[in-house]
Amino acid sequence: MQNDGTSAPAALSEEASVSSIKERLTEANARRHTIETAIAGALALLQATPVGLTGPLVDEEGFPRGDVDLYAVREARHTVATGRNDLRAVQDQLHELLGDLHEATAESAKKQMDVDSVLHAQRKREVEALQRKQQKEAAMRQMMPFLRVEAITDGSPAFTAGLRVDDEIVSIGGIDAGAFLAVRLPGLAKEVADNEGLVLTVWASRSSIDDSGAQRRVVMELPLVPQRWRGEGLVGCKFTPL
């Protein structure tokens, strides 16, 4: 079987190959049955005669025997001889096709196992990533917010990142509530400027209404990219310390 290096076309090619081998096996098996039936019929005819398969067709004086249908006997013997040769050829073909089928299905099964292994590893990575995110969210819920978004401009980097008015900032870049006590707003401005054009991870707490109608706060991770835009500053929002 050929493999062109692409998974979907290769899989279709393998399925077509297996299907083709099975179809050829069915055809060869049908030919074997036809040949065996013809041989059996010829042998039955010969066994009903005095000469059978190998008896002489002439009498002791060398004349053609008169107690058998010589033409029918010769035809039956020919059918047996050629049929046995044809049967050996078909059996060889069947043996080869069975080997091809075993190889094709084994290769297909191996590739399916490889695909399953890759998918399992991918699912494992996704589960681990989700667990890390959930653990990070749980940790962030325990932290104290230190800034509130007082104002934000539509189309600004902060708005594009997903920040909204009244969001409370739990962490921005490397600054959390403890660090903010030391650096205050000038330190925050420096953190933003140092990350111009880069992703600055912001964890924000936002008031939300759940399905039961109760109000609660949820934390979310937002990708803020400080950058020049049509408005002032690099983020386009105003923070107020809490």
Image (cartoon, grey):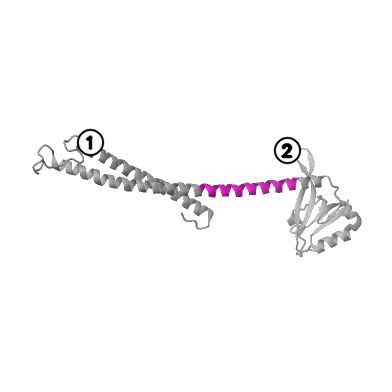
Looking at the image, residue 1 sits to the left or right of residue 178; the answer is left
What is the span of residues highlighted in magenta in the rendered image?
108-134
Mark 2 highlights which residue? 211
Tell which tag, 2 or 1, sits nearer the viewer. Answer: 1
Q: Residue at x 26, y 38 (%)?
A: 40
Magenta stretch holds residue 114: yes
Looking at the image, residue 81 sits to the left or right of residue 96; the answer is left
226 or 14: which is nearer to us? 14
Total marks in image: 2
**What type is the residue that disc 1 sits on?**
Ala
Q: Residue at x 44, y 50 (%)?
A: 17
Q: Residue at x 50, y 58 (%)?
A: 4
Mark 1 highlights which residue? 44
Q: Is residue 55 above or below residue 204?
A: above
Q: Position of residue 226 (x, y in %)?
A: 77, 61
Disc 2 to disc 1, C-alpha distance: 85 Å
Q: Residues within 10 Å of mark 2 (few under 14, many from 20)?
A: few
Numbered disc 2: secondary structure: loop
154 or 128: which is nearer to us? 128
Which image quadrant for residue 29? top left
- Residue that lies at the very extreme toward the front in this rendered image: 60
Q: Could you tell me what secondary structure mostly forms the magenta stretch?
A: helix
Magenta stretch holds residue 228: no
**What type is the residue that disc 2 sits on?**
Asp
Which callout, 2 or 1, points at the residue further toward the start of the chain?
1
- Residue that lies at the very extreme toward the top in this rendered image: 48
Numbered disc 1: secondary structure: helix
Observer able to see residue 107:
yes
- Pointers 2 and 1 in contact (CB under 8 A)? no
28 or 197: which is nearer to us? 28
Q: Residues within 10 Å of mark 1 (few under 14, many from 20)?
A: some
The numbered disc on residue 81 is: none
